[in-house]
Image (cartoon, helix red, strand yellow):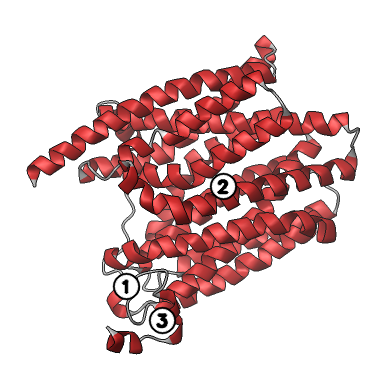
Amino acid sequence: MGNIKGKYSWLESQLTRVVKIRMGEGKSIALHFVTLFILMFSYYLLKVIRDPLILSESTAEVKSYSTSVQACLLLVLLPLFSKLYFTFSQHSDHSRFIRVVMLFFSTNLLLFALLYFLGLAIGIVFYIWLGIFSVVVVALYWAFCADCYSTDAGSRLFIFIAVGGAIGAWVGSQCAGWSYQLIGVSGIMGLSSVLLMTAAILTGVCYQSVPSRSKSRTPAVIANQDNWRLAILKIFKKPYLLLIATFIILINFINSMGEYILAKFVVDFAMELELAGEDKQLYMTEFYADYIAWITLFGLILQIFVVVKLFKWVGVGASILILPIIMMFNYTFVLYIPMFSVIKWTLVAENSVNYSIQNTTRHALFLPISREDKYIGKNVIEGFFYRFGDMLYGGVVAIGITFYGVDKMGFIMLNAMLAFCCTIVAFKIRNHYRNLEDEMDSLK
């Protein structure tokens, strides 16, 4: 073993302490780690200023409606984007398409910075744009990683690369608050644009640095999106997939509604302080910088110390219960103690679990099913039903306020009831998952 380690580079010998790598892979995963760090750093700088920007120009209700518009646009754009990706992915350099997309979004940021500098209201458009950016670019980066590495290499290295993204998210959210005071909204957008350009340049180096024996040998294939309607109908014929789809809708609806409730508390508290103009936006930016920083920090801790071991402790089936139970407890607690600080910290806990444990568990739910059902589950559930939750949330807010005059407490009560329903669905998923595992074991 000592002889083998002697052949590692200095960087690889350091990385072997935290990740299982083979000789020649050190430079590659270090570059991917740094690239995803920069990408998430850039995104979280923008994410912190996103909500204060739209809330200072409009209301929490407009924010919820913008989320629905964003979901509708994504449902239209994602199938088109997949076809475009398929066309470019046939190129010998797998980094070409992601570089083009990153550079496109970075020029968008420069335009937004200019418009804001000129005093134009960009809050709503920027909110919708950033939602599309986060879905497209982050998903594309992981698709790029899959294009770079073989299945064996990816299964060993992706966890380490993901930690780079988690750290970048935390650092970005930490830096956003004081960066706003130094360089303002236009400055943050300009800085994020430069970071995104840097990440675009690094992707080309990332691909070239992957050793030949670790590279993917399978050409990229993007599933045909033309038959989404038939695929959606097929979901309803598969009880297990239908349960997962229902669960995803409920989780996304409850989480989005929680963010709306928090936004209402933020706006109301700013009004109590009699803040307006730049003072109001500064307060909101500092609040969301602190709020998102705590989420990313706890999410990072869970990702490093809990997620890897969780499946061994309780299994995938039981892991799916964690988030809905936390949600049920949170909103019941807030219902009895509707304080600003309480809703803030309950949502910190909810989102930390959602971005770490829940995301990992969601992917694992598709392991014990057929290849065809995995395609349907991944493509349609995450492409359609996830966005449907956002659209449904925006519609409920609009109807509740316009026709029934529902206040914050009414929406908190709705979330508590839906979290209870979500927990029941999670129990059913757990039972189905265990049955599928038993079936697989019997075939061995």
- Residue 352 drawn at (x, y percent): 54, 44
From mark 2 to mark 3, how far is it between C-alphas? 39 Å
The type of residue carrying mark 1 is: Lys
Residue that protrudes farthest toward the left in the picture? 443
Residue 270 falls in which quadrant of the image? top right
Q: Give SS at disc 3.
A: helix
Residue at the location (33% across, 85% down)? 5
Which residue matches tag 2?
132
Mark yes or no: residue 62 visible: no
Q: Which residue is mark 3?
A: 13
Residue 303, image x, y percentages? 47, 53
Query: Mark 2 to mark 1: distance in Å?
Result: 29 Å
Task: Give how far across and how far down residue 83 sits, in percent.
Answer: 40, 52
Residue occupying the far top of the picture: 404
Say whether marks 3 and 1 touch (CB < 8 Å): no
| Quarter of the view holding residue 85 | bottom left
Q: Position of residue 43 (x, y in %)?
A: 62, 56
109 sits left or right of 269 in the view? left
Kindly identify the amino acid type of the residue bearing the numbered disc 3. Answer: Ser
On the question of residue 142 being in view, the answer is: yes
Point 86% across, 30% down: residue:
271
